Amino acid sequence: MVEIKSQFDPNLRKLILKKKQIAVIPVGSIEQHGPHLPVSTDTDIVTEVAKRISEKNGFFILPTITYGVSFEHAPFFNLSIRESTLRAVLSDLCISLLSNGIKIVFIINGHHGNLKPIKNIDVKLKKLSKNKLEVFPLSYWHFMKRDFDHAGFVETSLMLAISKNIKMNFAKKGLITNKMTKQQIQKLGKLANQSFPKATKNGIWGDPTKATKKDGQTILAEIIDNLSKRCQTCLTGHES
């Protein structure tokens, strides 16, 4: 792994000239995650995921884009940028990487609200770069068996595995969907995309109260294994 921000210019240019390099851009958010997790949760998790993926595969890693599209969490705390802003920043960074000789980029996403801005960004950048640039947008939670949640069992377990900034004594159950139909869950999902507090009331989707560090380590290992395999598939065009 090469952490770009800590490198020196001559060394970076030598590394890029030596072989075909691959870069990773992690994207997170700053938004409420209930009373027990910090507002940096999405950023913290995706930074760790991207770091481990980069270490495992020898990728270049860029500093995490800390801000995402989180307007749906208002009036709970969120620091948000527009979809067009995020798309523009990612596009600019990818083009800048290309100008420095890096032609393959993985965008690793850690926040649900960022899905729309990164959709089809690979196609647009391929066209913009006249087929010189390959970009692969991937969201880490698509690489685990468990259902996506927000400040629930999964995210809380992951945070317990990577951070000490958790207040489990404040953890409370949020929206529980176990006994709901797929249609009911989809309806609530659409509502949450517009206003998360209207769907969950306390800003939590799931039950964080039984989350453990051990579960987090298991889920994280699963994500890294599956995501790493997908990265290799993207690079080779063959299932590993």
Image (cartoon, helix red, strand yellow):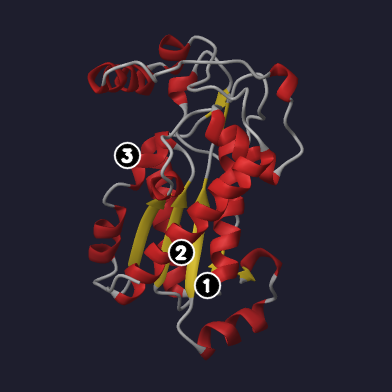
Q: Quadrant of residue 212?
A: top right
Residue 228 circle label: 2
Element type where label 2 sits in the image: helix
| Residue 152 is at least partly visible in this image | yes
What residue sits right under mark 3 in the picture? 116
**Which residue occupies 49% across, 68% down?**
23
Type of amino acid under label 3 = Lys
Along the viewing direction, whichever of 45 and 84 lies nearer the viewer: 45
**Which residue occupies 49% across, 52% down?**
223
Q: Quadrant of residue 207?
A: top right
Mark 3, other Cα within 10 Å: few <14 / some 14–19 / many ≥20 = few
Which residue of the protein is positioned furthest toward the bottom in this rendering? 18
Q: Position of residue 155 (x, y in %)?
A: 56, 35
Tag nearer the camera, 3 or 2 = 2
Mark 1 or mark 3: whose residue is earlier in sequence: 1
**Which residue occupies 52% across, 20% down?**
204
What residue sits right under mark 1 in the picture? 57
Mark 3 or mark 2: whose residue is earlier in sequence: 3
Asked if disc 1 and disc 3 are in contact, CB closer than 8 Å, the reply is: no
